[in-house]
Each structure stands twice: as C-alpha cells, then as structure tokens.
Image (cartoon, grey):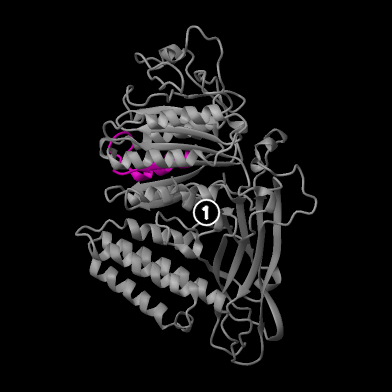
C-alpha cells in the first residue's frame, strides 16, 4: 500500500505483482498477451498553447488526463475474479423493509459471481458474527450463502468497528487472494458501540491495508479492546508475529473468549466458546476462502502477510438520513478505490450495490501513480509547480509531485489540474515546461506498466498575445472549482452558516450558467449544473443540515467516478459496466 508516509519512490511497489500461483484467479484472460494494448492512455495539455513573454501572465495551468480503455472483447463483462466481503448492519433500526431489501440485494450480488470469485458475509448489531466465511462461489457454496442470507434477523445497537474489523479479518484469512478485493459496509445509523470516533476508525482502516505485520496486528487488537469479550464473535486476539511476517493467534484457542457463527449446512451454534463450531465426528478442516461450506471453517494458524494480496477497497453505503456521512466518507476514502454511497430510500440499495459491483468487476488498472516533474532545463528558466489540485498529491521535495490515482475501471477518465510558473524565456517554438509519467498494474497482463513521458510545452513569443483557451482544460478547472466550493459550503453549513453556504453555491451555479459551453448545451457543463442543483437540496430541505447528498455529489466530482444509488444521477460518469450491473440488480 502506498501512503504519503511510506512512499519513497513513484513506481508501483513490487508487492502488487501477482505470483505465478495467483494467475489462476484471473477470469478469461490468456496467460500472456504479446501485443496487448496498454489499458491506460496518458496525455498532457496546457490551458494555452502560447503565452507571450510580454504578457502580464506569469503562471498558468495544464491538465494531465488518464483514460482507461474499454473492456476487452474476450472478458465476458469482467476483467478479474473478485473477493468480496459484506459487513451488514442488523441493528434494530434495520428491521422491516430495510432488511428485506438488503436480503434481496445480497441475493442479487451472488448472481454474477463465478466459481473463482469469493463472497463472505458479516453482520453487526450489538454483536458481530461471521454469517458466511469468504468462500469460492461454487454452486454448493452459493446455495448455502443464499440460505444464510434468507435467515438474517436484526438485533441490538450498532457496533460498526467490530463488524468492519471482522470482515477485514475474513479477507486477510484468504489463501491466494484474487487481484480485486473489496469490502462493502452498509449501515443506517451512528456507530454507538466499539470504536465510535472517526479519526480512530480511519486509522484502523488504514492499518488494515498496511504492509506492516505489526500495524495490522495492532489494528485487529485495537478493534477488540473497544469491545467486551462477548460482543464480537469470531475475531480472535492476534497480538503475536512470527519471523515470516505472520500474525499468530493465541496458543490455546479453546480458551479464546469468542465464538464464530457456524457456516452454512452446519448445526446451529450451541454455547459460547470457539471449540463449539467443530464437529466431533469430523476430522476435516477447511481453509477459509478456498473450500466448501459444508465443513466448518478451521481456526487459522496464521494470517500470512506475504500473500495477503492487493489492498482492499472499502465501499460504504449510508442508509437513510440518520447515518454519519462524514465518517463513512472518511473511512472509505482512506482506502484505494473506495467510495461512499448515499442510499436515500429503501429500494435505492439495489442500484447502489449494482453500481459498485459494476465497477469492481471491470477494474483495468490498479495502484496507478502519476508523477509530474519539472525538467532541469525548465527549472533553470524559472518553471516551478505551484499547486497540484488533487487530495492524494505528494510533494517529493525536488520540485516534482506524485499523485496516487488508485484503480481505474473500464472507460473511466481522471484529470489532474496543475498550476505552474511560466519559463522566463522568449521563443516562437514550444518550450518544455513539465513532464508527466504514469506507473500502474495492468490487470489484464498482470504486469507493472509504464506510460509516458508526456510533455507540456508552451511557446513564449516576443509579444503580449495569448492563444485561445483549451476548452477541455477549462472544463476540468471548473470541476475543481465546483468541488472546492461544495466543500467550503459543507463546512459553513456544519458551522450553522447555511445562508452563506447557499449563497456560495448559487454563485457557483451562476458561473456555470454564464459559460458559453453551458449555453451551447455542452453535456459536461450541464452535468455540473445539475450536480450543484442537487446539492442545494441538502441546504434547503431539512431543519438540521446533514449533507449526505452533498457529500456523495462532491465525492463523485472529485474522483470522477459515479457513486450513486439513483439510476439517473451522476450519469456523466457512469460506465457501461456500472449501468448494466445497476440495471441487473433491479431485476427479479
């Protein structure tokens, strides 16, 4: 995992390169493609191609664009097998139609999963249970999972941290994990048991994706210290590490204070105590994530961090109006490729889950890292990067920046706006100012791949003239401004200054409407205007500002990725895979 703290160079770490043993986890992809097309296309364009040396303008902007290719024809609508674990809130407030719709959604989630995909289910209320361990979706396991889903019931309060950590442990226990790994967390309320403070939850989630055994061990234990011993079922203390970077459980597992809910087709749980889950008549033990659900899961000897796989993406679904959108957005954003969905109405959960599934089943690239640098000759002429408008930027300290772009779904595009000082030279020919390079993991070829370099050059004639604005760059700069204004408006509303927040958004809407592109019917500008109008509803509707809708829209614009529970929302960023899966989830 790459973070601002542990990133020492800009290339993709070798740990994301799958081993030979991992290649069987990819679906319908040949072992090698000698003439395969790069899945990400990199380009770099200045706002103005020419700015006169006598102009009063001393700095300008440019846009780095990264565009993912469409799904390959032989992919059968997917690029890789997936490991998915769902942590479902089953507290008392989820009873009735909410739980009924969630059951139907989970059933729909199983439909597209094949025999090389894994699915696991954790529930959390006042207690947390492994309802179904992360197993390959064979016909038998899929039928067993359906039975468990149909039997779900509500109970108690909302121990979100316990459910989250237990679900993450399920993913950590998988041997030879798939290349794409995701955790879906759905809740309708506030975390009121276990770890409840957002900064602590964010730290815990980041630690789960860390490369360090001690960090993961500490996170697992942190989640337990906040619980009483009879709250979390299945999450065993794992404080020790061995020399092979494994986390070891207690020596005497029979004395572990927690029990695991039995897996499908096993007899009902009896009294508490982890040994109750084993059948005395059976000597077979199953490795989680690799075998049949007809046998009870064996307590793992270790969690092997050397094969823990790619980082897990966390998708959080906030159900109704009472959830903590700030917390859900924060913990999802702390994972690569994660996202927050606002599920406004009960039936919207179908579209939300379908949208997320359509994305993770069409991942084309992972661990993408962009580097923007100033060539030495340009630096000598006064070129300097002023700002990189991206929340994942890292200042390298040598005049260059890296940006952790995460993963890319098929057809997705990301744009990074850069502000920089102009070269203090005179030239009718294009003058090199910046260079962009990209490194990423190609999911189709299972190889680390490079794109670039791409140059950003601007001519500096002996005049005060400036060439026409590049409309594509201007559009992305406007998107960045909209995001900035939405974030400021959210802060103002949370500080009880809703009038000022509304005025800010109205001003932004007027700016969009005044543009010639909007008046010409440009689809992108029209989409921006629609986003601002939808966000305004949050500031006008409720007596108390909660900002769920605004958070969701801001995240969509910032990440240029659809994260909507409405089939018609964020349509500009919806890929074909997302649209198709969202529609499929609503089918009976």
Residue sitting at the far front: 588
Residue found at x 48% / y 33% = 120
Q: Looking at the picture, how far across and down is residue 570, in whole percent?
A: 44, 62
Q: Looking at the picture, how far across and down is residue 281, in whole percent?
A: 50, 7
Quadrant position of the N terminus in the picture: top right
Residue sitting at the far right: 34
Q: Could you tell whether 337 is left or right of 188 in the image?
A: right
* Residue that carries the numbered disc 1 in the rendered image: 580
Q: How many labels sit on residues? A: 1
Q: Could you tell whether 380 is left or right of 31 in the image?
A: left
Determine if residue 219 is in view: no
Q: Secondary structure at mark 1?
A: helix
Residue found at x 68% / y 53% = 73
Residue sitting at the far left: 543
Residue 342 included in the magenta stretch of the image: no
Quadrant of res 146: top left
Residue found at x 50% / y 65% = 389
Q: Looking at the picture, how far across and down is residue 363, in whole percent?
A: 59, 50
Depth check: 568 or 451 in front? 568
Residue 434 in the image: above or below residue 255: below
Residue 462 in the image: above or below residue 264: below
Residue 206 in the image: above or below residue 234: below
Residue 64 in the image: above or below residue 323: below
Q: Could you tell whether 444 is left or right of 154 in the image?
A: right
Q: Looking at the picture, how far across and down is residue 554, in whole percent?
A: 41, 61
Residue 197 included in the magenta stretch of the image: yes
Depth check: 534 or 165 in front? 534
Depth check: 186 or 389 in front? 186
Task: Count residues near mark 1 (Cα–Cα under 10 Å), then give few for <14, some for 14-19, many for 20+.
Answer: some
Q: Which residues are magenta?
A: 185-207
Quadrant position of the C terminus in the picture: top left
Determine if residue 270 is in view: yes
């Amino acid at each position: 995992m790459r973070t601002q703290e542990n990133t020492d160079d800009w290339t993709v770490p070798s740990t994301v390169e799958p081993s030979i043993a991992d290649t069987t986890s990819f679906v319908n992809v040949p072992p090698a493609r000698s003439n395969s097309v790069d899945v990400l296309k990199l380009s770099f364009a200045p706002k103005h191609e020419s700015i006169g040396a006598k102009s009063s303008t001393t700095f300008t902007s440019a846009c780095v664009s990264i565009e993912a290719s469409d799904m390959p024809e032989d992919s059968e609508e997917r690029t890789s097998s997936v490991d998915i674990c769902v942590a479902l809130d089953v507290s008392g407030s989820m009873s009735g139609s909410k739980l009924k719709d969630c059951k139907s959604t989970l059933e729909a989630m199983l439909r597209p999963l094949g025999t090389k995909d894994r699915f696991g289910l954790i529930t959390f209320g006042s207690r947390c249970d492994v309802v179904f361990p992360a197993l390959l979706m064979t016909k038998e396991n899929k039928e067993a999972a359906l039975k468990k889903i149909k039997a779900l019931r509500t109970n108690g309060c909302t121990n979100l941290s316990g459910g989250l950590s237990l679900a993450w442990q399920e993913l950590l226990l998988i041997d030879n994990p798939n290349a794409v790994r995701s955790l879906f967390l759905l809740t309708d309320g506030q975390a009121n048991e276990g770890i409840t403070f957002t900064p602590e939850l964010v730290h815990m989630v980041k630690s789960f994706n860390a490369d360090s055994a001690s960090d993961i061990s500490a996170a697992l234990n942190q989640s337990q210290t906040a619980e009483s011993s009879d709250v979390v079922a299945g999450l065993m203390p794992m404080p020790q590490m061995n020399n092979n970077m494994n986390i070891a459980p207690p020596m005497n597992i029979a004395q572990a204070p927690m029990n695991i809910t039995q897996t499908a087709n096993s007899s009902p749980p009896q009294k508490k105590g982890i040994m109750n889950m084993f059948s005395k008549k059976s000597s077979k033990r199953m490795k989680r994530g690799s075998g049949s659900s007809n046998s009870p899961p064996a307590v793992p000897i270790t969690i092997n961090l050397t094969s823990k796989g790619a980082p897990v993406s966390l998708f959080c679904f906030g159900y109704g109006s009472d959830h903590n959108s700030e917390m859900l957005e924060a913990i999802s954003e702390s994972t690569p490729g994660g996202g927050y969905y606002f599920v406004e109405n009960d039936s919207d959960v179908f579209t939300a889950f379908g949208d997320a599934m359509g994305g993770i089943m069409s991942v084309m690239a992972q661990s993408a890292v962009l580097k923007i640098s100033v060539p030495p000759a340009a630096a000598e002429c006064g070129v300097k990067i002023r700002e990189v408008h991206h929340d994942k930027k890292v200042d390298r300290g040598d005049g260059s920046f890296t940006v952790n772009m995460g993963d890319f779904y098929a057809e997705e595009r990301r744009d990074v706006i850069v502000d920089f000082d102009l070269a203090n030279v005179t030239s009718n020919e294009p003058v090199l100012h910046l260079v962009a390079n990209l490194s990423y993991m190609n999911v189709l070829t299972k190889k680390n791949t490079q794109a670039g370099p791409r140059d950003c050059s601007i001519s500096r004639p002996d005049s005060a003239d400036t060439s026409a604005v590049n409309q594509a760059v201007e559009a992305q700069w406007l998107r960045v401004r909209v995001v900035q204004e939405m974030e400021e408006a959210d802060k103002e509303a949370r500080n009880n200054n809703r009038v000022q927040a509304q005025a800010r958004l109205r001003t932004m809407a007027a700016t969009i409407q005044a543009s010639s592109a909007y008046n010409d019917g440009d689809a992108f500008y029209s989409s921006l205007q629609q986003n601002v109008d939808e966000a305004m509803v949050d500031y006008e509707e409720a007596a108390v500002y909660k900002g769920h809708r605004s958070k969701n829209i801001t995240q969509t614009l910032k990440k240029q990725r659809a994260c909507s529970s409405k089939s018609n929302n964020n349509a500009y960023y919806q890929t074909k895979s997302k649209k198709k899966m969202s529609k499929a989830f609503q089918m009976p």
